[in-house]
Each structure stands twice: as C-alpha cells, then as structure tokens.
Image (cartoon, rainbow, N blue to C red):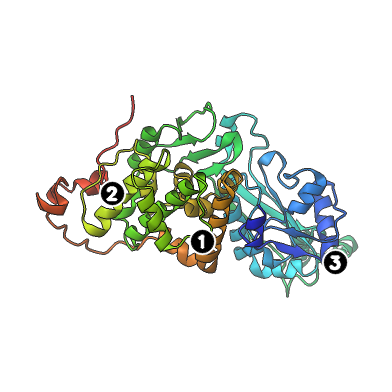
Amino acid sequence: MRKLIEKGLMFGNLVPVTAPALVARYNRALKHLTGRETTLSDFHIDISGYSPEIGAELEDQLYLNHAGVNRQFILLTMEQRHAPLLEAQFSTSRDILRQFFDANERELFALTAQDAVAGELVNSVYSVAEPARLLGIRTVRVEADTTGEVVANAAELGRKIDAFKTQADAWYDDVLIADMIGLAKRTGDVIRNPVSLAQMEFAQDSFWTAHFGGLYVLRDVSAPAVLTAGAPVEMPLDTYPLSDSTLIAAYLQETGLVEPIVQARGIDAAAILQQKMDFIMVSFAAERGEDITRVDRRALRALARRFAGKMEEPFASAYEGLAALHRWSSQGGRWPQITSEHPAYFYAMRAADTPQRDLVNRLLAELAPLDVRQLFICHKELFYRHYADWPEAKQAFVVEFLAREYQVDKAGARAALFGHEPEMAEPPAQPKLAETGPWSGVPNAEDDLISRVGPWGAVRRRN
C-alpha cells in the first residue's frame, strides 16, 4: 500500500494532530467516550476523529465504532470536514458527519477553539449479530457535546434564565442564582453568544454495510430488497446474490436504478467506454507479465493489436463487448447484442438520476471490478482489497493513473463520469431508424423500445 499512501490515494487528507494541547483534548474526549487513552504524541485523524495509528496502538481498529454500529466521533478542528472516513461500516456515515459539520459550522468553530467535541451517530440497533437486525436501522441521530458538556450546560443555563425572568420572587432564590453563576462560569454569556448544536436526524432507508460480507439494503424503491455480496442471509425482504447477474440486472431495471452509458445525457459515452476497455487491457497485460509501467494511448493501441483475439477470460468477453458498444457509439457500427449474462453488461451501465445514485454506483463498481477508476471512486474498501492482490505492474499503473487523471480534478472527474443533466422541458423528437445501414437490426424508434427496456432488450427474472 506504500505507493497509494505516497500519492495521497490512501490515508489522503487526514488531519495531523501534533500540538500537545490538541493531543490532550483528544485524550480527554477519547476517555470520555471509551475510557481509554493514547500514549502517542502525534497522529492523524479522519473526519470522525479515528486514527489508524491509535487503532494499531490499541490493537482495535474499531475503537470508535464498537461492533461496527453507532459510530462515535471526536472533532478537534474544522479541517476534519474535508477528511475521508476510514474503516467505514456504513456508506452513509461520512455524509451524515459532513452535513453535521455544515449545519453547525459557526458553533463547532467556537466550541473546538477551546475543547474537543465528542459525539455519536445513534440508532436503535446496538448489535448486528443477525442480519435481520440491520433492518431495524431506520434513522440515525447525531448527539454531540464538548467533553466539558458546554452545550448541555448552556441549555440548562438557558432554562434557568427563563425561570429567573418568569418566576415570582426569583430575585430572592439564592439557589437558582448560585446555579446560574456556576453554569455561566463554564459556558460564558449564552445571551450574547448562544451555545447550541442543531438536533439532526437522518433517514436510513437505503445503505451499504460491510457487515456479513457486504449488503446493499434498498428500501425506498418500488421493490425493496437486500443485495448480498457475501454468503446468503435470511432477511424479511427479498434477497438477491450479486453472483446472479441476470437476477440483479432484472431488479435494477425493474426499479429504474440504472441506465446504459450510451443513453446518458451530458457525458462522452465513447470516451468512458474506451477508458474502461483500457483498464481491462492493462489488467490482462499485467497478468501476462507485460511491461505496463509507461502506458500511453499509443502503447494501449499496440497492446490491443497484439492481443486481438488472444485475450483470455474473464477479460476477453468484457473487452469485446465494450469494444462493440464503443464502435456503435462512436461510428455507428453493428448494434451489439449484450444480455445481462454478458460480462460487459454492468461495465456498460451507470446509476440513473435517483436518490440512490451513489449507492448504485458503488454496487456497479463491485459488479464491474476491472474498471479500477470507478472502483476507487465509488467503493474504496473493495478497491484496497483488490489492490493488495494485483501484480506489482498493475499497482504501479493504477496509482500513476489515479494520481494523474483523478487527483488533480476530483469534482470534474466525478461530474464527467456520474453527473446528470436536467431533463429538457420538451424532449427532442426521436428520429426514425433506417431498416438497413449502420442501424440495421435496431427496432424502429416509433416503438420507443430502447427507451422502454434499454438498448439490449428486456431482462427477465429467473423463476
């Protein structure tokens, strides 16, 4: 993993904690949450305050995430808002923390100037010993305060101030006055400088979890289900294994969660397909022991010519299917007959513009792992696992590619690959397709078949 770390592709954007005052604050918060402390004088933390160095020291990578649920967090600085989330057990955790930062920016800036803010992402499930318990997670509530409980004390002081203003003879209540003075010493002037954090609760209808080998829980769709990457699990919802490509394709089509890349608006479909083909070619060449340390467009074309018709599975079919689709997209070649069982099928799909878009792109990255760019962007946990088993030549190529093509413009790369343009007020008229020529074999546009069932025809469920 050294190459990844050196290029900032792993543990990138972690926040260094080196000042003795910040280390002391972190230890107070850590003891407050877990009863443990670190002896390290410097370390790095992610958006939640998790430190891989402290995890190694304590021999517990889940020291802030006991049993992988109800993740705890420690906020030392607003710089953490841009950090990644390591050891993620749920796909929604980082987004929740980021929204908490954004909604409480001014308050957190003031609070972390003097103390650490410690908190927890609370749901009603404290153990997931059985898969079905995951469905008990319906909402996640953010609870947070400083280790000195400034927020709670400020709320209590506010209530006492209200009582002092409204109760008769409050001027003569020595106990009330003494309590107000004591709280004010710890909170400051809450009238001029209110101290509070927004009460935030997030629905958890659809999410990915690392538990049980990886599960995709989809509940806010037309056909709620659980998609399983690991061993079969018992759930009160329909469960579909990712190993059954036809079943998964039928489900994604039925729920409208995916669309073909060639039909997507506002993207260069041909360029995206070509890049996916390049990744497959590089993977095959690396497995053959070829030198791919400096692969440019010219070298990739040479590899394609050299291995034309000689590629082996699982690379050959995926490459040839994408190549046929690329020819159709860029040159109007023969319409490719690609079914859901074809190895190229999921490489040629992307998430539709739905609330579940990011989750579906994560799923597609798992179903099409040779597309190393999408795998890195959408499913880093799986990317790191695959990376460890790649030949060294492929590791070097992927690291250089991501550092050169993705790191320099992350937002632009995401927009180019996954962005969606808004629909036009009136869709343009669909052209009638000729019965002969480059469009031969494609159904007439009057039937609008492509729009209804996708470019490769209907996908049927297995009985």
Please tell me which residue is depicted at 60% across the width and 48% down the height of the picture: 384
Q: Quadrant of residue 179?
A: bottom right
Residue 352 shows up from this direction: no
Structural distance between the alpha carbons of marks 2 and 1: 27 Å
Please tell me which residue is depicted at 31% across the width and 60% down the height of the picture: 265
Residue lying at the far top of the rendered structure? 463
Q: Examine the rendered structure and indicate whether residue 118 appears above or below residue 249.
A: below
Q: Examine the rendered structure and indicate whether residue 406 appears above or below residue 133.
A: below
Q: Sequence-wise, which precedes: disc 1 or disc 3?
A: 3
Residue 459: x %, y % from top left: 29, 36
Q: Mark 1 against mark 3, which lies toward the viewer? A: 1
Please tell me which residue is depicted at 40% across the width and 62% down the height of the picture: 298
Please tell me which residue is depicted at 75% across the width and 61% down the height of the picture: 151
User: Do labels 1 and 3 touch, CB within 8 Å?
Assistant: no
Which mark identifies residue 324?
Answer: 2
Q: What is the secondary structure assignment of the residue under circle 1?
A: loop
Q: The residue under label 1 is which amino acid type? A: Arg
Residue 308: x %, y % from top left: 34, 47
Q: Examine the rendered structure and indicate whether residue 266 appears above or below residue 320.
A: below
Structural distance between the alpha carbons of marks 1 and 3: 46 Å
Q: Badge 1 is on which residue?
A: 294
Residue lying at the far left of the rendered structure? 435
Give the class, few, some or many, for how many residues have Cα within 10 Å of label 3's Cα (few <14, many ≥20): few
The foreground one among 211 and 422 is 211
Q: Badge 3 is on which residue?
A: 21
The foreground one among 371 and 37 is 371
The foreground one among 429 and 414 is 414
Q: The residue under label 2 is which amino acid type? A: Ala
Residue 153 shows up from this direction: yes
Q: What is the secondary structure assignment of the residue under circle 2?
A: helix
Structural distance between the alpha carbons of marks 2 and 3: 61 Å
Give the class, few, some or many, for how many residues have Cα within 10 Å of label 2's Cα (few <14, many ≥20): some
